[in-house]
Amino acid sequence: MSKEFGFTVEGECLVGKSEALKQMRELSRFDIYIVPEYFEVGRLTSFSRRDLTDVQHIQDEIIELEKRRTDMATTYLARHPTSILGFDRSYLSCLAFEWSMKHHGCLDGYDYLLEKLIRETEDENIILPTQVLHLTANPATIEKRRVAHLSKGHGDVSNFLKDLDVRQTQIKYIREKGIGLYNGAYRQIVTDNLNQKQVAKLCLDHVDNKPEFTRVNLDILYQYECA
């Protein structure tokens, strides 16, 4: 199996990524190892963005979390070589967040993070997914889910991620870069009127019928400009 084989499930908070992955694992005819979301693997020591040093420190810690996720994935694949990887978010989410910070006038680490991702990928310290499943829902659906989430005693999303313009910037980034980097290996799935099992089945259909894959070239992201 290729070191880079696997799919990522992308999307904004509360769109249903983690549940889709769990349902996929239950319904799949093959074994799926779920690579946990970044903050299930570890926590940042600080979210402060007082200056560029703070911002770069955040990106360094994100890279370390990505390396730990890669170690978890490759260790599992060494024991289960016929399995595939299902990433709960990927580098696309990290870049989309920093891009939205940049686009909305905040101190960002986009260029720094991109440079580090390229270097660590070339050094084979980080593996990349070969497919992108991008879950989306309209803002009213996300707000309904947020209210339900809060009613169960869960924490709220940050004020920055409540901003609709910010969220749309991130969605656009993942969609455009998903298509640009992955072509037919990218699929957007609108989840508003689907239950969790239906979402999982659509995701599995895409994974089962994956197109011929070309190695991801992250260098083209240097050329990205927001329309």
Image (cartoon, rainbow, N blue to C red):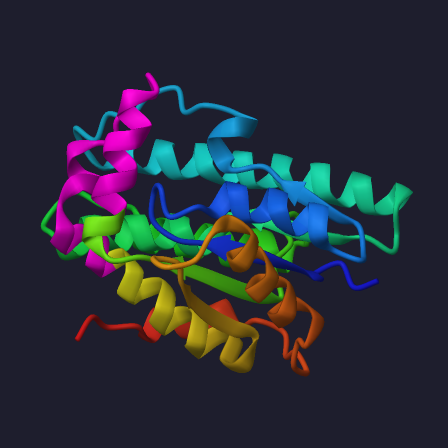
Residue shown at 43% from the left, 56% from the top? 92
The image shows residue 97, relative to residue 134, as above or below, that is above
Where residue 82 appears, x then y in whole percent? 87, 56
Q: In which quarter of the image is the C terminus?
A: bottom left
Toward the top, the furthest residue is: 153
User: Does residue 125 appear in the picture of this structure?
Assistant: yes
Q: In this view, does 48 lie to the left or right of 85?
A: left
The quadrant holding residue 212 is bottom right
> Residue 154 lies in magenta, yes or no?
yes
Q: Quadrant of the N terminus?
A: bottom right
> Residue 121 lies in magenta, yes or no?
no
User: Does residue 126 appear in the picture of this structure?
Assistant: no
Residue shown at 51% from the left, 63% from the top? 133
Where residue 118 appears, x then y in whole percent? 51, 59
The image shows residue 162, relative to residue 104, as above or below, that is above
The segment highlighted magenta reads 142-169
* Main secondary structure along the magenta-highlighted residues: helix
The image shows residue 179, relative to residue 167, as above or below, that is below
Q: Is residue 70 left or right of residue 146?
A: right
221 or 27: nearer the viewer: 27
